[in-house]
Amino acid sequence: MKVLVTGAAGFIGSHLAEKLAQRGDEVVGLDNFNDYYNPAKKRANEKRLNEFENFKMIEADIRDRARMIALCEDEQFDAVAHLAAMAGVRPAVESPDFYVEVDYNGTQNLMDAARFTNVENFVFASTSSVYGNTKQIPFVENDPCDRPLQPYAAAKRAAEILGFTYHYLYGLSFTAIRFFTVYGPNGRPDMMAYLVADSITKGIEIPIYNGGDMFRDWTFVEDITDGAVAALDRPLGYEVINLGRGEPTKLRDFVNMIEKLAGRKANLVDKPKPAADVVTTYASISKAVELLGYNPKVSVQEGVKAFWEWYMVNG
C-alpha cells in the first residue's frame, strides 16, 4: 500500500509513518516543519524516518491547495492518513482564524486532492475535544458534538462533517479517528507529560489546573497508531471512531507517577480550569473494537515509564 502521512515529522505522525514503513508500505511523509515548537525535534524525527528506503519526506503546507493536488496526482496514493494540524486547545482561543484555515480548509484541500485522484481511503485525525461539555459519559460517537468549546475542536468537528458530505457526494471513504490524550516517546513539548518532566528536571514552573482534579483518558502513542493503521487497512465508507484507552486517570495521579519515577516533585502552581477545558475525557471504545479490532495494550503505568525512560535519554 502507498500511503501519504501528513504531519509525519510530528509526534503521532512520525510514530505512524515509522510503523507503516516497518511493515513494508511505501510511505510519503508531508510536513511544513513550522515553529509551533522547536523544529529541531521534527528534524530528528525526519532523520529517523529517512533510514527507511521506502519512506520519503515532502516539505509542504496543506494550505497550498495546488501543491496538495499535484502531490496526489504525482504519487497516486492508495490511502491518506491526515494528521497534520495546528494542535492545542488553548492557543486556538487566541488565533481562531489560523486554526480554521489549517485544520478545516487545509483538510478540505487534501480531501479534494484525494477524490480527484481516486484515493481508496482517507483517515482523518480528530480529537476528543469535539465532545465539549457533554453529559454522556463515557463519550460515544453518536453524540451530536454540536457545542465545541474552542476553535480547535470546532474546526475538527466541521472537518468530520465535511467528510460525510464528501463520502455522500463523491464516494470518498472517510474515517475520522478521535484521539484521546495521546502521550509517549517523542511527545510534543507542550503536552502535559513533557511539561511535567521538564518541570521536574529543570525546575520550570507549570500550571496544574483545578488542583489536578481532572480526568483524562491517557492513551499511549503505540496503541493510537495501531488504531490508525487498522483504520487505513479498512475502508469503511463513512465512520467516526474513538481511539482511547477507555480508563480515565486523574491528572494529579498521572503527575504523581512521573514524580515517583523521577524521585522528585514537579514545580506546580494551582490555577483555575480554563473555560476551553473540560473536567473529564472518557472514551467508549466498543466501536473501535468492533470495526477495527482495536485493543489498547499499554497501561498508564507502563506508558508513563516508557515515556520517562525516553525523556531521560532524549528530553
Image (tube, rainbow, N blue to C red):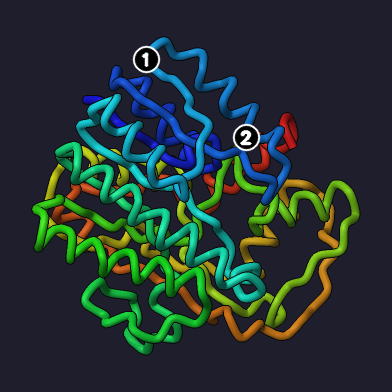
Q: Nearer the viewer, residue 76 or 174?
A: 76
Residue identifier under label 1: 54
**167 lies left or right of 162:** left
The vertical placement of 218 against 297, above or below, is below
Report the residue at 38% width, 36% height from top.
Answer: 5
* Contact? badges 1 and 2 (CB < 8 Å): no
Report the residue at 15% width, 43% height from top.
Answer: 234
Of pointers 1 and 2, the one earlier in the residue sequence? 2
C-alpha separation, residue under disc 1 versus residue under disc 2:
19 Å
Q: Position of residue 103 (x, y in %)?
A: 45, 60
Around disc 2, counting alpha carbons within 10 Å, would you say few (fewer than 14), some (14 to 19), or many (20 or more)? many
**Which amino acid, by three-letter code, is at mark 2?**
Lys
Q: Nearer the viewer, residue 180 or 263?
A: 180
- In the rendered image, the residue lying farthest to the right is 203
Report the residue at 49% width, 78% height from top.
Answer: 280
In which quadrant is the C terminus drawn? Answer: top right
Residue 306 seen in the current view: no
Around disc 1, counting alpha carbons within 10 Å, would you say few (fewer than 14), some (14 to 19), or many (20 or more)? some
Residue identifier under label 2: 42
In which quadrant is the N terminus drawn? Answer: top left
**Which amino acid, by three-letter code, is at mark 1?**
Asn
